[in-house]
Image: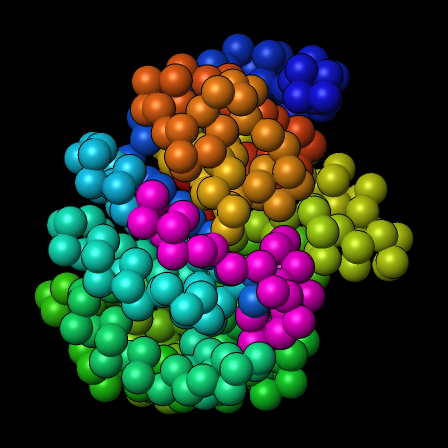
């Protein structure tokens, strides 16, 4: 199946036509999806996370991730995602342990989990701002727009106001202020079948609006393209927009952006310990080409850096315009 994907898709053809070599460069980031449970069910979510999901990474698998980090000093970053990653019962332990190893820890934090807590156990998460601050965790939070209507349209009623309050709480413990070491980055996703606007312009607009209206500061804004998979793809299909959206992505293919795609420098780990080229391939269950190292329990840096990355049409989402990754533009 994977070999067929490699030989017969539009993305591979575009890469060949552009004379690009998209082999892995290194592995400096372990991106770990530790749960699909979330207090929200956003329209654009490629994970299909919701309050009803039950998938959770076990402590055994968390410990193996930590062992891999300890044994591989060149993997300097741990990127924890979900779902709402804070809803995994071993989240705090993972953060604390990775920080003791000297790793830079990033958390994909949705801001509202502070107030909603765990939808299944009702456990409170109001301690999170202080916990993040204590451990110098880099926070990366989605805020589709600086206006209530557009944010709630994508993420659900009431999310904008909770997000604003969450940002204020993070600001109150030092996040978003240059020089504190407490980094708060926001993520912009278009509300609908559009490519993101210029990242620098959006960042300037966000900073002006959030400071002017709410007194909120943050460090950087990442503009990320909505990936045409799962929940967002289903929304495109319902509205008859999938073909037009794919055409838009393909026509905007940028070779410079393609060279900076995130799968060339990270490996994605699923809640059950399986390894994938990226979080999107994980959600599509596109297995690694080398099955001998496709688990965190059989982690092999040499094999992983020599692997052939699996590409398919959804990869146009990462290479359109200025490019898109978990860290924003790639070009």
Q: From where the camera sits, is residue 233 visible?
A: yes
Q: From this view, report whether residue 68 is shown above or below residue 100.
A: above
Q: Identify the main secondary structure in magenta.
A: loop
The picture places residue 241, in percent across and down from the top left corner, at: 82, 51
* Position of residue 45 in the picture relative to residue 132 (left or right): right
The picture places residue 268, in percent across and down from the top left corner, at: 45, 40
Q: From where the camera sits, is residue 138 visible?
A: no
Number of on-image labels: 0
Q: From this view, report whether residue 8 is shown above or below residue 281.
A: above
Task: Answer whether residue 260 is magenta in the image.
Answer: no
Task: Answer whether residue 62 is magenta in the image.
Answer: yes
The picture places residue 113, in percent across and down from the top left corner, at: 46, 79
Q: Quadrant of residue 29?
A: top left
Task: Name the residue rendered at 30%, 67% in the picture.
Answer: 92
Figure coloring: rainbow
Task: Name the residue rendered at 66%, 41% in the picture.
Answer: 284
Residue projecting furthest to the left:
179
Q: Quadrant of residue 153?
A: bottom right
* Position of residue 84 in the picture relative to residue 62 (left or right): right
The quarter of the image holding the N terminus is top right
- In the image, which residues are magenta? 38-65
Task: Name the residue rendered at 38%, 56% in the picture.
Answer: 59
């Amino acid at each position: 199946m994977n070999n067929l994907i490699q030989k017969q898709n539009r993305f591979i053809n575009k890469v060949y036509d552009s004379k690009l070599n998209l082999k892995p460069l290194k592995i400096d980031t372990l991106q770990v999806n530790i749960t699909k449970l979330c207090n929200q069910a956003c329209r654009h979510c490629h994970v299909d996370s919701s309050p009803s999901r039950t998938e959770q990474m076990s402590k055994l698998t968390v410990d193996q991730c930590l062992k891999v980090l300890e044994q591989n000093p060149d993997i300097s970053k741990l990127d924890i995602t979900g779902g709402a990653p804070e809803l995994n019962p071993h989240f705090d332990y993972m953060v604390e342990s990775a920080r003791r190893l000297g790793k830079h820890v990033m958390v994909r934090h949705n801001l509202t989990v502070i107030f909603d807590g765990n939808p299944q156990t009702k456990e409170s998460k109001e301690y999170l701002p202080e916990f993040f601050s204590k451990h110098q965790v880099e926070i990366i939070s989605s805020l589709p727009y600086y206006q209530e209507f557009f944010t709630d349209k994508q993420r659900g009623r009431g999310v904008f106001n909770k997000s604003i309050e969450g940002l204020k709480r993070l600001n109150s413990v030092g996040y978003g202020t240059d020089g504190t070491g407490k980094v708060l980055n926001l993520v912009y996703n278009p509300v609908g079948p559009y490519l993101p606007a210029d990242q620098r312009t959006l960042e300037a607009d966000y900073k002006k609006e959030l400071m002017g209206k709410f007194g909120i500061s943050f460090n950087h804004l990442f503009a990320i393209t909505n990936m045409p998979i799962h929940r967002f793809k289903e929304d495109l299909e319902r509205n008859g927009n999938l073909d037009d959206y794919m055409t838009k992505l393909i026509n905007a293919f940028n070779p410079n952006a393609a060279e900076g795609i995130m799968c060339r420098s990270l490996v994605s780990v699923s809640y059950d310990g399986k390894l994938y080229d990226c979080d999107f391939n994980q959600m599509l269950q596109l297995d690694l080409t080398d099955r001998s190292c496709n688990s965190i329990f059989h982690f092999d840096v040499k094999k992983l850096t020599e692997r052939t990355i699996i590409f398919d049409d959804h990869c146009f989402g990462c290479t359109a315009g200025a490019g898109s990754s978990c860290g924003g533009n790639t070009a």
